[in-house]
Every structure is written in structure tokens, then in C-alpha cells.
Image (cartoon, rainbow, N blue to C red):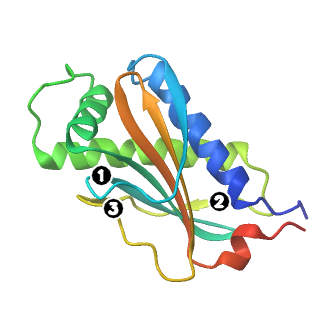
Amino acid sequence: MSARATADEWTAAAVAITSELSEGMLGLGEHAVVGPVERPDNELCGAYLPMHTSDGAFYLGILSDHTGIRTLANAMLGEEPDAEIADAELVDAVGEVANIVGGQMKCRVESGSPAQLGLPIFAWSPVETPKGAVQQAVQIMLGAVPATVVVVWPAPSLAMKKD
């Protein structure tokens, strides 16, 4: 069996893949990693994707402010950054970005067994991290769009374990 991946490895993969999407498929321009943040800003919204691996279950979050999340959704839909879109389209588009990032994470991070993705959950404000959970958040720039990539492990022992 392969060694377990740590929360750091899953988070690094999420940041790298999200950044690559900015420059590639989304066409938002060059990315920049601003750095870790203790907790996401209360004004952020976005998609959370449940993932389950042999390393444990966790959530991947792709967050931005309301303007940034609309720009991200429009980029995913091939629209102009300030195009008007319905909230349902925005939710679907940002959820699809989270699905793409999660799918690529499955391929990049060596884990004891294949990862399984859940259905994305959209939240208009950051989800409160449960007491005792481990949360890692990294602020990045996707072109001109400020974003935060979050990985939340409900069980801290799973997040830090390395065989």
C-alpha cells in the first residue's frame, strides 16, 4: 500500500491545479501565490467539494469575493468577466471548477487508494470550520481575481498522519 498523503500535500496540489487553471482553461492570466491565511475572509463565497480517500475525508474549497466568484464563473462559461449570469449558472460553473480541481488532485496526490469525489456544495459565505478540524487556506491571485483555496479535514489525526 502507498504511503498516506498529508494535508500539506493535498493543499499544495489544490493550489497548483487552481493556479494552472487560471493560466490555461479559464484564461484569467498569470497566477500568484499570496500565501497562507489563518481563516478565509467572511466576505468570501464559493464551492466546497467533499473528497474521500484512504487518507480520510476532507473538503476542498474554491472561494473568492462576490465579484471574483462571478468573474471565475464567467471564465468557466467562456463569457466576458462582467457578463450578467443567473445565480444558478454561477453555482454550477464554480462547482465545476471545484470538480476539475478535485479530479486533478486525484491524479496528482499519491494516496493509498483512489479518491472519490462528492457533489459540490455552494456557499454564499465561508463554511465554519468544525471545532477540532484542521483547515489550511492559501490566498492566490488568478490573474486579477483574488481567491482562496481551502482544505478542511474534520479529523485532524487523518490530516497529519504519514505512514
Q: Residue at x 45, y 25 (%)?
A: 22
Q: Can you see residue 9?
A: yes
**Is 6 displayed left or right of 151 in the figure?**
right
For the residue pair 163 and 44, the one nearer the viewer reads as 44
| Local crowd size for mark 2, using a 10 Å CA cut-off: few (<14), some (14–19), many (≥20) | many
CB under 8 Å between discs 2 and 3: no
Q: Which residue is mark 3?
A: 126
Secondary structure of residue under mark 1: loop
Q: Position of residue 100 (x, y in %)?
A: 49, 41
For the residue pair 24 and 38, the one nearer the viewer reads as 38
Inspect the image, locate mark 3, and give the three-letter code of the amino acid beneath it: Pro
Q: Quadrant of the N terminus?
A: bottom right
Inspect the image, locate mark 2, and give the three-letter code of the amino acid beneath it: Ala
Q: Indicate the quadrant where residue 120 lies.
A: bottom left
**Is 93 displayed left or right of 36 in the figure?**
left
Furthest residue toward front: 38
| C-alpha gap between disc 3 and disc 1 | 6 Å
**Is 25 displayed left or right of 112 in the figure?**
left
Q: Which residue is mark 1?
A: 44
Q: Position of residue 149 (x, y in %)?
A: 49, 47
Q: Earlier in the sequence, mark 2 or mark 1?
A: 1
Q: Position of residue 57 (x, y in %)?
A: 60, 71
In the depicted structure, whether residue 41 falls above or below residue 1: above
Q: Residue at x 33, y 61 (%)?
A: 126
| C-alpha gap between disc 2 and disc 1 | 27 Å
Q: Which residue is mark 2?
A: 115
